[in-house]
Amino acid sequence: MIRGAFVELYKGLGYLKTYRNLNMLAFVKILKKFDKVTGKQVSPIYLRVVESSFFNSSDKALKLADEVEEIFVKHFAEDNKRKAMKYLKPTHRKESHAVTFFIGLFAGCFIALFVGYVIMAHITGMYRSSSDTVYMETVYPFLSMFSLLFLHFFLYGCNIYMWRKTRINYSFIFELSPTKELKFRDVFLICTISMTALVGVLFLHLSLVAKGYSYSQVQAIPALLLLVFIIVLICPFNIIYKSSRYHFLSVIRNIVLSPLYKVVMLDFFMADQLCSQIPTLRNLEYIACYYITGSYKTQDFNYCSRNTYYRDLAYAVSFLPYYWRAMQCARRWFDEGQKIHLVNLGKYVSAMLAAGAKVAYEREKNVGWLCLVVIMSTSATVYQLYWDFVKDWGLLQFNSKNPWLRDELMLRKKFIYYFSLGLNLVLRLAWLQTVFHYNFEKVDYRVTMLFLAALEVVRRGQWNFYRLENEHLNNVGKFRAVKIVPLPFHEVDDQD
Protein backbone atom coordinates (compact mmCIF):
# COMPACT_ATOMS: atom_id res chain seq x y z
CA MET A 1 0.00 0.00 0.00
CA ILE A 2 2.83 2.41 0.86
CA ARG A 3 4.62 1.53 -2.36
CA GLY A 4 1.45 2.28 -4.32
CA ALA A 5 1.14 5.63 -2.52
CA PHE A 6 4.68 6.57 -3.58
CA VAL A 7 3.91 5.58 -7.18
CA GLU A 8 0.78 7.76 -7.17
CA LEU A 9 2.70 10.68 -5.63
CA TYR A 10 5.44 10.39 -8.26
CA LYS A 11 2.83 10.22 -11.00
CA GLY A 12 1.05 13.28 -9.60
CA LEU A 13 4.29 15.26 -9.53
CA GLY A 14 4.85 14.29 -13.16
CA TYR A 15 1.37 15.57 -14.02
CA LEU A 16 2.17 18.83 -12.18
CA LYS A 17 5.35 19.27 -14.21
CA THR A 18 3.45 18.63 -17.44
CA TYR A 19 0.75 21.08 -16.36
CA ARG A 20 3.39 23.78 -15.79
CA ASN A 21 4.98 23.18 -19.21
CA LEU A 22 1.61 23.28 -20.96
CA ASN A 23 0.71 26.57 -19.31
CA MET A 24 4.05 28.06 -20.29
CA LEU A 25 3.54 26.91 -23.86
CA ALA A 26 0.04 28.38 -23.84
CA PHE A 27 1.39 31.79 -22.77
CA VAL A 28 3.94 31.70 -25.60
CA LYS A 29 1.33 30.85 -28.24
CA ILE A 30 -1.18 33.41 -26.93
CA LEU A 31 1.43 36.20 -26.99
CA LYS A 32 2.57 35.25 -30.50
CA LYS A 33 -1.03 35.41 -31.67
CA PHE A 34 -1.45 38.78 -29.93
CA ASP A 35 1.65 40.18 -31.69
CA LYS A 36 0.38 38.90 -35.04
CA VAL A 37 -3.09 40.40 -34.69
CA THR A 38 -2.06 43.78 -33.21
CA GLY A 39 1.20 44.20 -35.13
CA LYS A 40 3.05 45.00 -31.91
CA GLN A 41 6.06 43.22 -30.42
CA VAL A 42 5.13 43.01 -26.77
CA SER A 43 5.61 39.26 -26.25
CA PRO A 44 9.25 39.52 -25.00
CA ILE A 45 8.14 41.94 -22.24
CA TYR A 46 5.33 39.73 -20.99
CA LEU A 47 7.33 36.52 -21.43
CA ARG A 48 10.05 37.83 -19.09
CA VAL A 49 7.38 38.35 -16.44
CA VAL A 50 5.87 34.89 -17.01
CA GLU A 51 9.24 33.12 -17.08
CA SER A 52 10.28 34.75 -13.82
CA SER A 53 6.97 33.95 -12.12
CA PHE A 54 6.87 31.41 -9.30
CA PHE A 55 4.92 28.72 -11.18
CA ASN A 56 7.61 28.54 -13.89
CA SER A 57 10.80 29.25 -11.91
CA SER A 58 10.07 27.10 -8.87
CA ASP A 59 11.84 23.75 -8.76
CA LYS A 60 10.05 22.40 -5.67
CA ALA A 61 8.10 19.83 -7.67
CA LEU A 62 11.27 18.60 -9.39
CA LYS A 63 13.16 18.32 -6.11
CA LEU A 64 10.27 16.51 -4.47
CA ALA A 65 10.10 14.08 -7.41
CA ASP A 66 13.84 13.40 -7.02
CA GLU A 67 13.37 12.76 -3.30
CA VAL A 68 10.49 10.37 -3.94
CA GLU A 69 12.61 8.58 -6.52
CA GLU A 70 15.55 8.22 -4.11
CA ILE A 71 13.35 6.91 -1.30
CA PHE A 72 11.64 4.45 -3.63
CA VAL A 73 14.94 3.14 -4.98
CA LYS A 74 16.29 2.65 -1.46
CA HIS A 75 13.29 1.08 0.27
CA PHE A 76 11.27 -0.61 -2.48
CA ALA A 77 13.75 -1.55 -5.22
CA GLU A 78 16.82 -2.73 -3.26
CA ASP A 79 18.93 0.19 -4.59
CA ASN A 80 18.18 -0.90 -8.15
CA LYS A 81 17.16 2.21 -10.07
CA ARG A 82 16.15 0.30 -13.20
CA LYS A 83 13.79 -1.85 -11.16
CA ALA A 84 12.37 1.22 -9.45
CA MET A 85 11.65 3.00 -12.73
CA LYS A 86 9.57 0.03 -13.89
CA TYR A 87 7.11 1.01 -11.15
CA LEU A 88 7.54 4.79 -11.25
CA LYS A 89 7.61 5.16 -15.04
CA PRO A 90 6.03 2.01 -16.50
CA THR A 91 6.34 1.73 -20.27
CA HIS A 92 3.09 1.10 -22.11
CA ARG A 93 2.95 -1.91 -24.37
CA LYS A 94 3.26 -0.74 -27.97
CA GLU A 95 0.56 -1.94 -30.32
CA SER A 96 2.22 -3.95 -33.06
CA HIS A 97 1.07 -4.11 -36.67
CA ALA A 98 1.84 -7.83 -36.48
CA VAL A 99 -1.18 -8.25 -34.20
CA THR A 100 -3.44 -6.66 -36.84
CA PHE A 101 -1.89 -8.87 -39.51
CA PHE A 102 -2.51 -12.06 -37.56
CA ILE A 103 -6.07 -10.98 -36.76
CA GLY A 104 -6.74 -10.75 -40.49
CA LEU A 105 -4.89 -14.00 -41.18
CA PHE A 106 -6.77 -16.06 -38.61
CA ALA A 107 -10.07 -14.35 -39.45
CA GLY A 108 -9.61 -15.52 -43.05
CA CYS A 109 -8.71 -19.02 -41.88
CA PHE A 110 -11.77 -19.10 -39.62
CA ILE A 111 -14.12 -18.02 -42.42
CA ALA A 112 -12.67 -20.63 -44.82
CA LEU A 113 -12.88 -23.44 -42.28
CA PHE A 114 -16.37 -22.38 -41.17
CA VAL A 115 -17.65 -22.42 -44.77
CA GLY A 116 -16.11 -25.86 -45.21
CA TYR A 117 -17.68 -27.06 -41.97
CA VAL A 118 -21.13 -25.74 -42.97
CA ILE A 119 -20.90 -27.45 -46.36
CA MET A 120 -19.79 -30.71 -44.75
CA ALA A 121 -22.59 -30.50 -42.15
CA HIS A 122 -25.14 -29.81 -44.90
CA ILE A 123 -23.96 -32.80 -46.95
CA THR A 124 -24.07 -35.14 -43.96
CA GLY A 125 -27.35 -33.61 -42.67
CA MET A 126 -26.05 -33.11 -39.15
CA TYR A 127 -28.18 -30.08 -38.27
CA ARG A 128 -31.50 -31.13 -39.73
CA SER A 129 -34.49 -31.98 -37.58
CA SER A 130 -33.77 -35.67 -38.22
CA SER A 131 -30.06 -35.30 -37.51
CA ASP A 132 -27.47 -37.74 -36.18
CA THR A 133 -28.43 -37.91 -32.50
CA VAL A 134 -25.02 -39.11 -31.32
CA TYR A 135 -23.23 -36.19 -32.99
CA MET A 136 -25.68 -33.59 -31.70
CA GLU A 137 -25.56 -34.93 -28.16
CA THR A 138 -21.79 -35.47 -27.89
CA VAL A 139 -19.99 -33.05 -30.24
CA TYR A 140 -22.42 -30.19 -30.77
CA PRO A 141 -22.22 -29.07 -27.09
CA PHE A 142 -18.53 -28.21 -27.69
CA LEU A 143 -19.43 -25.99 -30.65
CA SER A 144 -22.28 -24.37 -28.73
CA MET A 145 -20.21 -23.72 -25.61
CA PHE A 146 -17.16 -22.25 -27.33
CA SER A 147 -19.24 -20.25 -29.83
CA LEU A 148 -21.13 -18.47 -27.05
CA LEU A 149 -17.96 -17.96 -25.04
CA PHE A 150 -15.93 -16.40 -27.83
CA LEU A 151 -18.88 -14.41 -29.17
CA HIS A 152 -19.07 -12.84 -25.73
CA PHE A 153 -15.31 -12.24 -25.74
CA PHE A 154 -15.49 -10.71 -29.22
CA LEU A 155 -18.22 -8.32 -28.05
CA TYR A 156 -16.01 -7.41 -25.09
CA GLY A 157 -13.34 -6.39 -27.62
CA CYS A 158 -15.95 -4.27 -29.40
CA ASN A 159 -16.84 -2.74 -26.01
CA ILE A 160 -13.20 -1.82 -25.40
CA TYR A 161 -12.97 -0.21 -28.83
CA MET A 162 -16.11 1.86 -28.22
CA TRP A 163 -15.08 2.79 -24.67
CA ARG A 164 -11.76 4.08 -25.96
CA LYS A 165 -13.40 5.92 -28.86
CA THR A 166 -15.86 7.67 -26.54
CA ARG A 167 -13.14 8.28 -23.89
CA ILE A 168 -14.81 6.18 -21.21
CA ASN A 169 -12.20 5.46 -18.56
CA TYR A 170 -12.84 1.72 -18.31
CA SER A 171 -9.32 1.02 -17.02
CA PHE A 172 -9.95 3.17 -13.96
CA ILE A 173 -13.43 1.73 -13.41
CA PHE A 174 -12.16 -1.87 -13.54
CA GLU A 175 -8.89 -0.97 -11.73
CA LEU A 176 -6.83 -2.51 -14.54
CA SER A 177 -3.09 -2.04 -14.96
CA PRO A 178 -2.49 0.24 -17.97
CA THR A 179 0.61 -1.74 -18.93
CA LYS A 180 -0.97 -5.21 -18.70
CA GLU A 181 -4.61 -4.81 -19.67
CA LEU A 182 -5.89 -6.40 -22.87
CA LYS A 183 -6.36 -4.02 -25.78
CA PHE A 184 -9.18 -4.59 -28.24
CA ARG A 185 -6.72 -5.95 -30.82
CA ASP A 186 -5.48 -8.51 -28.29
CA VAL A 187 -9.06 -9.61 -27.65
CA PHE A 188 -9.78 -9.94 -31.37
CA LEU A 189 -6.56 -11.93 -31.85
CA ILE A 190 -7.49 -14.38 -29.08
CA CYS A 191 -10.99 -14.77 -30.54
CA THR A 192 -9.83 -15.40 -34.11
CA ILE A 193 -7.13 -17.90 -33.08
CA SER A 194 -9.50 -19.75 -30.74
CA MET A 195 -12.38 -19.95 -33.19
CA THR A 196 -10.03 -21.05 -35.98
CA ALA A 197 -8.76 -23.87 -33.74
CA LEU A 198 -12.32 -24.82 -32.73
CA VAL A 199 -13.79 -24.92 -36.24
CA GLY A 200 -10.65 -26.62 -37.58
CA VAL A 201 -10.90 -29.42 -35.01
CA LEU A 202 -14.65 -29.87 -35.57
CA PHE A 203 -14.13 -29.88 -39.36
CA LEU A 204 -11.50 -32.62 -38.92
CA HIS A 205 -13.80 -34.58 -36.61
CA LEU A 206 -16.77 -34.33 -39.00
CA SER A 207 -14.58 -35.32 -41.95
CA LEU A 208 -13.42 -38.45 -40.15
CA VAL A 209 -17.01 -39.35 -39.25
CA ALA A 210 -18.07 -38.85 -42.87
CA LYS A 211 -15.27 -41.15 -44.02
CA GLY A 212 -16.65 -43.98 -41.90
CA TYR A 213 -14.74 -43.71 -38.64
CA SER A 214 -16.82 -44.71 -35.62
CA TYR A 215 -17.58 -42.20 -32.87
CA SER A 216 -15.57 -44.25 -30.40
CA GLN A 217 -12.47 -43.74 -32.55
CA VAL A 218 -12.76 -39.94 -32.83
CA GLN A 219 -14.63 -39.14 -29.60
CA ALA A 220 -11.50 -37.88 -27.85
CA ILE A 221 -10.76 -35.13 -30.39
CA PRO A 222 -13.20 -32.46 -29.02
CA ALA A 223 -12.23 -33.36 -25.45
CA LEU A 224 -8.55 -32.79 -26.26
CA LEU A 225 -9.44 -29.32 -27.56
CA LEU A 226 -11.16 -28.47 -24.28
CA LEU A 227 -8.18 -29.83 -22.36
CA VAL A 228 -5.80 -27.63 -24.36
CA PHE A 229 -7.88 -24.52 -23.59
CA ILE A 230 -7.87 -25.36 -19.87
CA ILE A 231 -4.11 -25.93 -19.86
CA VAL A 232 -3.51 -22.59 -21.61
CA LEU A 233 -5.80 -20.84 -19.10
CA ILE A 234 -3.92 -22.13 -16.04
CA CYS A 235 -0.45 -22.24 -17.60
CA PRO A 236 2.02 -20.88 -14.98
CA PHE A 237 4.58 -19.70 -17.53
CA ASN A 238 4.76 -16.05 -18.54
CA ILE A 239 3.27 -16.58 -22.00
CA ILE A 240 -0.07 -15.88 -23.69
CA TYR A 241 -1.19 -12.94 -21.53
CA LYS A 242 -0.39 -14.54 -18.18
CA SER A 243 -1.32 -11.50 -16.07
CA SER A 244 -4.76 -11.24 -17.76
CA ARG A 245 -5.39 -14.99 -17.44
CA TYR A 246 -4.56 -15.05 -13.74
CA HIS A 247 -6.51 -11.88 -13.08
CA PHE A 248 -9.51 -13.52 -14.75
CA LEU A 249 -9.09 -16.62 -12.58
CA SER A 250 -8.90 -14.49 -9.42
CA VAL A 251 -12.13 -12.71 -10.38
CA ILE A 252 -13.85 -16.06 -10.98
CA ARG A 253 -12.61 -17.21 -7.56
CA ASN A 254 -14.10 -14.09 -5.94
CA ILE A 255 -17.42 -14.76 -7.67
CA VAL A 256 -17.61 -18.45 -6.77
CA LEU A 257 -16.75 -17.73 -3.14
CA SER A 258 -19.26 -14.89 -2.77
CA PRO A 259 -19.94 -13.35 -0.28
CA LEU A 260 -16.57 -14.11 1.37
CA TYR A 261 -14.65 -11.48 -0.64
CA LYS A 262 -15.28 -7.76 -0.76
CA VAL A 263 -17.06 -6.92 -4.01
CA VAL A 264 -15.46 -4.50 -6.47
CA MET A 265 -16.74 -3.28 -9.82
CA LEU A 266 -15.00 -5.94 -11.91
CA ASP A 267 -16.35 -8.75 -9.72
CA PHE A 268 -20.03 -7.94 -10.10
CA PHE A 269 -19.55 -6.90 -13.73
CA MET A 270 -18.14 -10.36 -14.48
CA ALA A 271 -20.91 -12.03 -12.46
CA ASP A 272 -23.45 -10.23 -14.65
CA GLN A 273 -21.70 -11.69 -17.70
CA LEU A 274 -22.10 -15.19 -16.25
CA CYS A 275 -25.86 -14.57 -15.96
CA SER A 276 -25.87 -14.43 -19.78
CA GLN A 277 -23.74 -17.57 -20.12
CA ILE A 278 -26.03 -20.09 -18.41
CA PRO A 279 -26.28 -22.28 -21.58
CA THR A 280 -22.46 -22.37 -21.67
CA LEU A 281 -22.30 -23.47 -18.04
CA ARG A 282 -24.91 -26.18 -18.66
CA ASN A 283 -22.99 -27.44 -21.69
CA LEU A 284 -19.80 -27.50 -19.64
CA GLU A 285 -21.55 -29.49 -16.89
CA TYR A 286 -22.91 -31.97 -19.47
CA ILE A 287 -19.51 -32.41 -21.14
CA ALA A 288 -17.83 -32.95 -17.78
CA CYS A 289 -20.46 -35.53 -16.83
CA TYR A 290 -20.17 -37.29 -20.20
CA TYR A 291 -16.42 -37.76 -19.98
CA ILE A 292 -15.91 -38.14 -16.22
CA THR A 293 -18.50 -40.90 -15.93
CA GLY A 294 -16.97 -42.76 -18.90
CA SER A 295 -20.16 -42.51 -20.98
CA TYR A 296 -18.07 -41.57 -24.02
CA LYS A 297 -16.75 -45.14 -24.24
CA THR A 298 -20.21 -46.47 -25.12
CA GLN A 299 -21.76 -43.24 -26.49
CA ASP A 300 -24.39 -43.48 -23.74
CA PHE A 301 -25.22 -39.78 -23.92
CA ASN A 302 -28.51 -40.27 -22.06
CA TYR A 303 -26.79 -41.40 -18.87
CA CYS A 304 -26.38 -37.85 -17.51
CA SER A 305 -30.04 -37.03 -18.18
CA ARG A 306 -31.22 -40.34 -16.66
CA ASN A 307 -29.12 -40.05 -13.52
CA THR A 308 -31.01 -38.04 -10.91
CA TYR A 309 -27.85 -36.61 -9.33
CA TYR A 310 -26.44 -35.20 -12.56
CA ARG A 311 -29.85 -34.00 -13.74
CA ASP A 312 -30.35 -32.04 -10.53
CA LEU A 313 -26.81 -30.71 -10.82
CA ALA A 314 -27.59 -29.42 -14.32
CA TYR A 315 -30.61 -27.57 -12.94
CA ALA A 316 -28.51 -26.16 -10.08
CA VAL A 317 -26.02 -24.74 -12.61
CA SER A 318 -28.86 -22.62 -14.03
CA PHE A 319 -29.31 -20.97 -10.63
CA LEU A 320 -25.63 -20.43 -9.75
CA PRO A 321 -24.95 -17.13 -11.60
CA TYR A 322 -28.05 -15.54 -10.06
CA TYR A 323 -27.13 -16.90 -6.63
CA TRP A 324 -23.57 -15.54 -6.89
CA ARG A 325 -24.87 -12.16 -7.99
CA ALA A 326 -27.42 -12.09 -5.14
CA MET A 327 -24.67 -12.92 -2.61
CA GLN A 328 -22.58 -10.05 -3.99
CA CYS A 329 -25.50 -7.68 -3.46
CA ALA A 330 -25.87 -8.96 0.11
CA ARG A 331 -22.14 -8.42 0.74
CA ARG A 332 -22.28 -4.88 -0.65
CA TRP A 333 -25.26 -4.10 1.57
CA PHE A 334 -23.34 -5.48 4.57
CA ASP A 335 -20.24 -3.40 3.74
CA GLU A 336 -21.90 -0.17 2.61
CA GLY A 337 -25.25 -0.25 4.40
CA GLN A 338 -27.16 1.03 1.35
CA LYS A 339 -30.64 -0.46 0.95
CA ILE A 340 -30.43 -0.12 -2.83
CA HIS A 341 -28.30 -3.28 -2.84
CA LEU A 342 -31.12 -5.21 -1.19
CA VAL A 343 -33.47 -4.01 -3.92
CA ASN A 344 -30.93 -5.20 -6.49
CA LEU A 345 -30.74 -8.52 -4.67
CA GLY A 346 -34.50 -8.87 -5.16
CA LYS A 347 -33.98 -8.72 -8.92
CA TYR A 348 -31.80 -11.83 -8.88
CA VAL A 349 -34.13 -13.61 -6.47
CA SER A 350 -36.98 -13.00 -8.94
CA ALA A 351 -34.78 -14.42 -11.72
CA MET A 352 -34.13 -17.54 -9.62
CA LEU A 353 -37.85 -17.97 -8.95
CA ALA A 354 -38.58 -17.66 -12.69
CA ALA A 355 -35.85 -20.20 -13.48
CA GLY A 356 -37.31 -22.54 -10.84
CA ALA A 357 -40.76 -22.27 -12.41
CA LYS A 358 -39.27 -23.14 -15.82
CA VAL A 359 -37.52 -26.19 -14.36
CA ALA A 360 -40.77 -27.38 -12.79
CA TYR A 361 -42.59 -26.83 -16.09
CA GLU A 362 -39.97 -28.88 -17.97
CA ARG A 363 -40.54 -31.79 -15.58
CA GLU A 364 -44.34 -31.62 -15.52
CA LYS A 365 -45.89 -29.77 -18.43
CA ASN A 366 -49.41 -28.72 -17.47
CA VAL A 367 -51.47 -25.54 -17.54
CA GLY A 368 -50.83 -24.71 -13.88
CA TRP A 369 -47.05 -24.67 -14.22
CA LEU A 370 -47.32 -22.83 -17.53
CA CYS A 371 -49.32 -20.03 -15.90
CA LEU A 372 -46.77 -19.84 -13.10
CA VAL A 373 -43.93 -19.61 -15.64
CA VAL A 374 -45.67 -16.74 -17.44
CA ILE A 375 -46.40 -14.85 -14.21
CA MET A 376 -42.93 -15.31 -12.68
CA SER A 377 -41.05 -14.63 -15.94
CA THR A 378 -43.12 -11.54 -16.70
CA SER A 379 -42.51 -10.14 -13.20
CA ALA A 380 -38.79 -10.86 -13.40
CA THR A 381 -38.56 -9.31 -16.89
CA VAL A 382 -40.28 -6.08 -15.79
CA TYR A 383 -37.99 -5.94 -12.74
CA GLN A 384 -34.89 -6.46 -14.92
CA LEU A 385 -35.95 -3.96 -17.58
CA TYR A 386 -36.53 -1.26 -14.97
CA TRP A 387 -33.11 -1.91 -13.44
CA ASP A 388 -31.41 -1.98 -16.86
CA PHE A 389 -32.88 1.29 -18.04
CA VAL A 390 -33.03 3.34 -14.85
CA LYS A 391 -30.30 2.05 -12.53
CA ASP A 392 -27.66 0.47 -14.77
CA TRP A 393 -27.95 2.78 -17.78
CA GLY A 394 -29.24 5.89 -15.98
CA LEU A 395 -31.85 6.52 -18.70
CA LEU A 396 -35.60 7.29 -18.62
CA GLN A 397 -35.04 10.57 -16.78
CA PHE A 398 -38.28 12.43 -17.48
CA ASN A 399 -36.89 15.90 -16.67
CA SER A 400 -33.83 15.46 -18.87
CA LYS A 401 -33.07 17.84 -21.71
CA ASN A 402 -32.79 14.69 -23.87
CA PRO A 403 -36.33 13.19 -23.74
CA TRP A 404 -36.44 9.78 -22.02
CA LEU A 405 -32.65 9.69 -21.79
CA ARG A 406 -30.29 11.66 -19.50
CA ASP A 407 -28.60 15.07 -19.64
CA GLU A 408 -25.09 13.79 -20.38
CA LEU A 409 -24.62 11.45 -23.36
CA MET A 410 -21.34 10.06 -24.68
CA LEU A 411 -22.77 9.25 -28.13
CA ARG A 412 -23.79 12.13 -30.34
CA LYS A 413 -26.69 10.43 -32.12
CA LYS A 414 -29.63 10.05 -29.76
CA PHE A 415 -31.46 7.53 -31.93
CA ILE A 416 -28.82 4.94 -30.95
CA TYR A 417 -30.03 5.12 -27.35
CA TYR A 418 -33.68 4.74 -28.37
CA PHE A 419 -32.78 1.80 -30.61
CA SER A 420 -30.84 0.16 -27.76
CA LEU A 421 -33.78 0.62 -25.40
CA GLY A 422 -36.08 -1.16 -27.85
CA LEU A 423 -33.55 -3.89 -28.65
CA ASN A 424 -32.93 -4.61 -24.98
CA LEU A 425 -36.70 -4.88 -24.44
CA VAL A 426 -37.12 -7.36 -27.32
CA LEU A 427 -34.14 -9.52 -26.35
CA ARG A 428 -35.29 -9.66 -22.72
CA LEU A 429 -38.40 -11.48 -23.99
CA ALA A 430 -36.46 -14.50 -25.29
CA TRP A 431 -37.99 -16.59 -22.50
CA LEU A 432 -41.17 -16.72 -24.55
CA GLN A 433 -39.50 -19.56 -26.45
CA THR A 434 -40.09 -21.63 -23.30
CA VAL A 435 -43.84 -21.11 -23.73
CA PHE A 436 -44.30 -21.28 -27.49
CA HIS A 437 -41.52 -23.79 -28.34
CA TYR A 438 -41.13 -22.34 -31.81
CA ASN A 439 -38.60 -24.15 -34.00
CA PHE A 440 -37.59 -23.94 -37.63
CA GLU A 441 -38.99 -26.96 -39.42
CA LYS A 442 -35.78 -28.17 -41.08
CA VAL A 443 -33.35 -27.23 -38.28
CA ASP A 444 -32.57 -29.17 -35.14
CA TYR A 445 -34.09 -27.57 -32.04
CA ARG A 446 -30.61 -27.32 -30.47
CA VAL A 447 -29.57 -24.87 -33.21
CA THR A 448 -32.61 -22.74 -32.38
CA MET A 449 -31.63 -22.73 -28.70
CA LEU A 450 -28.08 -21.72 -29.65
CA PHE A 451 -29.45 -18.82 -31.70
CA LEU A 452 -31.55 -17.60 -28.76
CA ALA A 453 -28.57 -17.94 -26.39
CA ALA A 454 -26.45 -15.92 -28.85
CA LEU A 455 -29.09 -13.17 -28.82
CA GLU A 456 -28.80 -12.97 -25.03
CA VAL A 457 -25.01 -12.62 -25.37
CA VAL A 458 -25.51 -9.82 -27.91
CA ARG A 459 -27.91 -8.11 -25.49
CA ARG A 460 -25.29 -8.34 -22.76
CA GLY A 461 -22.68 -6.86 -25.11
CA GLN A 462 -24.72 -3.70 -25.67
CA TRP A 463 -25.65 -3.62 -21.97
CA ASN A 464 -21.93 -3.50 -21.12
CA PHE A 465 -21.33 -0.29 -23.06
CA TYR A 466 -24.17 1.69 -21.49
CA ARG A 467 -23.43 0.31 -18.02
CA LEU A 468 -19.87 1.65 -18.11
CA GLU A 469 -20.96 4.87 -19.79
CA ASN A 470 -23.28 5.55 -16.85
CA GLU A 471 -20.58 4.56 -14.35
CA HIS A 472 -18.06 6.86 -16.05
CA LEU A 473 -20.44 9.83 -16.02
CA ASN A 474 -21.19 9.24 -12.33
CA ASN A 475 -17.46 9.10 -11.60
CA VAL A 476 -16.80 12.35 -13.44
CA GLY A 477 -19.69 14.05 -11.66
CA LYS A 478 -18.42 12.94 -8.27
CA PHE A 479 -14.69 13.51 -9.01
CA ARG A 480 -14.03 9.77 -9.07
CA ALA A 481 -12.36 9.74 -12.50
CA VAL A 482 -9.08 10.54 -10.74
CA LYS A 483 -7.41 9.00 -7.71
CA ILE A 484 -7.47 12.22 -5.67
CA VAL A 485 -10.49 14.47 -5.11
CA PRO A 486 -9.67 18.17 -5.83
CA LEU A 487 -9.27 20.40 -2.79
CA PRO A 488 -11.94 23.07 -2.12
CA PHE A 489 -9.81 26.03 -3.24
CA HIS A 490 -12.77 28.44 -3.37
CA GLU A 491 -13.52 27.91 0.29
CA VAL A 492 -9.85 28.53 1.18
CA ASP A 493 -9.86 31.76 -0.85
CA ASP A 494 -12.98 32.98 0.94
CA GLN A 495 -11.34 32.40 4.33
CA ASP A 496 -8.20 34.25 3.27
Image (cartoon, helix red, strand yellow):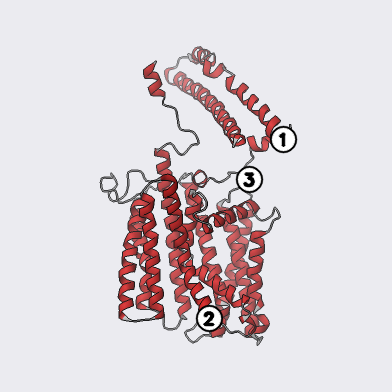
Compute the Cα span from label 3 to label 1.
20 Å
* In this view, the mark in front (2 or 1): 2
Q: Amino acid at mark 3?
A: Lys
Q: Earlier in the sequence, mark 3 or mark 1?
A: 1
Q: Amino acid at mark 1?
A: Arg
Q: Looking at the image, is 123 positioned above or below residue 467?
A: below
Compute the Cα span from label 3 to label 2.
53 Å
- How would you rate the neighbour count of disc 2 (Cα within 10 Å): few for under 14, some for 14-19, many for 20 or more? few
- Residue name at image x 27 percent, y 49 percent: 403
Compute the Cα span from label 2 to label 1.
61 Å
Q: Amino acid at mark 2?
A: Asn
Q: Which residue is mark 1?
A: 82
Q: Secondary structure at mark 2?
A: loop
Left of 489 or right of it: where is 202? right
**Where, by quadrant of the figure, is residue 336 drawn?**
top left
| 3 and 1 marks in contact (CB < 8 Å) | no
Query: Quadrant location of the N terminus?
Result: top right
Which mark, by number, is residue 192? none
Q: Which residue is mark 3?
A: 94
Image label count: 3
Q: Which residue is mark 2?
A: 307
Q: Residue furthest left?
A: 399
Residue 384 position, x and y percent, is: 36, 59
Query: Quadrant location of the C terminus?
Result: top left
Left of 115 or right of it: where is 368? left
Residue 141 position, x and y percent, is: 54, 74
| 3 and 2 marks in contact (CB < 8 Å) | no
Q: Looking at the image, is 371 positioned above or below residue 8?
A: below
Q: Secondary structure at mark 1?
A: helix
Q: Earlier in the sequence, mark 3 or mark 2?
A: 3
